[in-house]
Amino acid sequence: MPDELTPNPDSPRPVATPPANPAPPSDGTDIEPILTVPPVPGAPKPNPILVVDNLARSFGGLRAVDVDHLEVERGVVTALIGPNGAGKTTLFNLLSGFDRADSGRWSFDGRAVTAPAPDQLARQGMIRTFQLTKSLAKLTVIDNVLLGAPGQAGERLWTAPFRWRWRDQEHENTGRAEELLERFNLAHMRDELAGTLSGGQRKLLEVARALMANPVLIMLDEPMAGVNPALGQSLMRHITLLAHEGMSVVFIEHAMDVVTGISDWVVVLSQGRIIAEGPPWKIIHDDEVIDAYLGRRRAGEAR
Amino acid sequence: MDFDIIFGNAARAAFGPEAVILALAAIGLNVHFGFTGLLNCGQVGFLLLGAYGTSVSVATFGWSLWAGVLIGLFLSLALAAALGIPTLRLNPLLFAIATIAAAEIIRILIGSTDAIGLTGGPLSVSFDAGAFYDLNPYPDGPQDRYGVGTFEFTGQQLWVITVGWALVALISLAIFLLVRSPWGRVLKSIREDEDAARSLGKNVFSYKMQALLIGGGIGGLGGVIDAIKTSGADPNGFRPQVTFFAFAALLLGGAATYLGPVLGAVLFWFLREWIESFLRQLASESWLPAAAADFLDGAEGIISVAMVGLALVLLMLFRPQGLTGNQTELHLDAR
Ligand SMILES: Nc1ncnc2c1ncn2[C@@H]1O[C@H](COP(=O)(O)OP(=O)(O)OP(=O)(O)O)[C@@H](O)[C@H]1O
Ligand SMILES: [Mg+2]
């Protein structure tokens, strides 16, 4: 059993972990408790941010999502992988309130989600991005990001006309938004309309906008699709850092080097069901995952 | 052919009360359609309730003009609530249909013979707007005229348009202050993609409702001014084309801009009246063949509206963002 708990020394380490620590967990850092979790589908986690039970959604005869039990650990980076059409995006849509489940329950941050409304969940800190980017084309890049800022006094009708009531907050938010743009290589596009951005830049903008909302849990649907590798890496490193500061991250991704590079935990979905979960270095050797998703050659590469 | 008279007529229409009313209708529509993306096809319904609320309060119930004004505004806000609460959560097309249907149903009910006792029915309603004209500071003798050449108003007319344009300026300023704020940013984000707004925690329904109430109330104010200007209301003044004139003005001037609806309303009335006056003069030219004069006689109004429509089509072809709109914004849609 202790063997189970020790990370494979050959496995890629999360990019931004503190100084390499080959010793087994329980040294008190944030990400380690996840390693005590047995790598089986539906495994309970020590400190879950999201707990899902019997969640199901069908489209006609197709069971797109059929999850018996899933827990997502707080403060770590969880990757959600699986073949095209596995139900990953649908699962995001259900959890974030953009689609209605046929049945099932879930709780977020300790609160049962009884009447899922997307805006309400977002205000509670569950922020998701979309696989098909939703940039607000006729708003400037900076306005796109500023829109993400939570708790804006100037967004209330009664305060809005009186600039002095929201100027300071707007100023502060603008500073933070500009930092994010800097980090995502969009600073030079600050005052351009978002509709003029390239596809990859829009992906980046959407992630920046989501981060602007100070999420408790951020759910990214293929955030790196179309983003150049170097920038993608720096982006994900940034997100890992935020996870170390306590933000929880779930991201959908097809590129296995990214998944193994930055995730602490991987959940594998196939035909709507969770077929495996565990730390990345275990998942890539899981026979079922190799058969359903990675393929023999791909698994070799990822190692 | 006297171009002085034609120009005078056009200028009077462009700055007269009709343009004020159209400007208010278009400003309201701009809040709905330009900034929030709500396709309101029944803006005339808000004007109608503003006008009839005022007229009926005074004429039928004998209340004071100012109480009537408040009731007119209240009724137009009530229409916004009644339309928005059931439909704004649903398909946007449903909202569009509901607005045009509601406006037309109200007009038909108010103009029906059964409503004669309350609204005057098809006979229209009239009342004494003296309380408003008592405040007129301009000397208003039978000889008093204000303006230059053929562009002149009576004292009463000048008083209506002074108040009217002051209101247009105030409301435009208020809309500017509102829309440049983070509140306005949320409205525009809803116009662009309401799911994106939701994913960032914005209560889309609430913002749409706020926009609908504000824009509807501004339309209602246009109706109130219409009632005061004519000292009454007539169901035929509130046909669906009024909404489309407001759209025409908005698109002419430039949607989602601050001055576009005002500029558009002025231009709309200038063009419409210029063409109509021109045709009327043309019809009485002696060199015109009798058949052509016969054709023109009485059709000037219709032809001039058609010509304004044509102008709008040309504008959409060559400057689709309107006169004040932003060129780059337009080319984003294809991406
Ligand atoms: N609105 C819908 N109507 C009908 N079927 C749908 C709908 N949304 C998703 N599906 C179906 O549900 C299944 C899961 O789709 P989903 O988008 O969740 O896949 P995914 O895992 O995100 O795939 P990918 O990796 O390609 O993004 C697919 O078979 C899809 O056809
Ligand atoms: Mg997907």
Image (cartoon, rainbow, N blue to C red):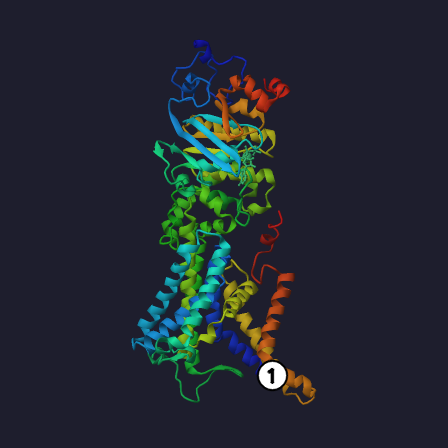
Left or right: where B281 falls relative to B76: right
Q: Position of residue B309 (x, y in %)?
A: 60, 69
The chain containing the residue under callout 1 comes to: B
Q: Of A108 and A288, which appears nearest the observer?
A: A288
Q: Secondary structure at mark 1?
A: helix
| A133 is higher (above) or lower (below) than B281 | above
Estimate how packed mark 1 is, as few (under 14), some (14 to 19) or many (20 or more) residues with alpha carbons within 10 Å. many
| B79 is higher (above) or lower (below) than A267 | below
Which residue is label 1 attached to?
Answer: B280
Q: Is residue B210 visible?
A: no
Q: Position of residue B241 (x, y in %)?
A: 52, 70
Q: Which picture quadrant has residue B85?
A: bottom left
Q: Quadrant of the N terminus of chain A?
A: top left
Q: Is label 1's Cβ within 8 Å of ligand 1?
A: no
Q: Which picture quadrant has residue B305?
A: bottom right
| A258 is higher (above) or lower (below) than B116 | above
Q: Quadrant of the C terminus of chain A?
A: top right
Q: Is residue A302 visible?
A: yes
Q: Residue at x 40, y 51 (%)?
A: B206
Residue with the most extreme front position: A61
Q: Residue at x 58, y 46 (%)?
A: A195
Q: Position of residue B262 (x, y in %)?
A: 50, 66
Q: Position of residue B130 (x, y in %)?
A: 34, 81
Q: Quadrant of ligand 1?
A: top right
Amino acid type indicated by mark 1:
Arg
Q: Of B255 and A290, which appears nearest the observer?
A: A290
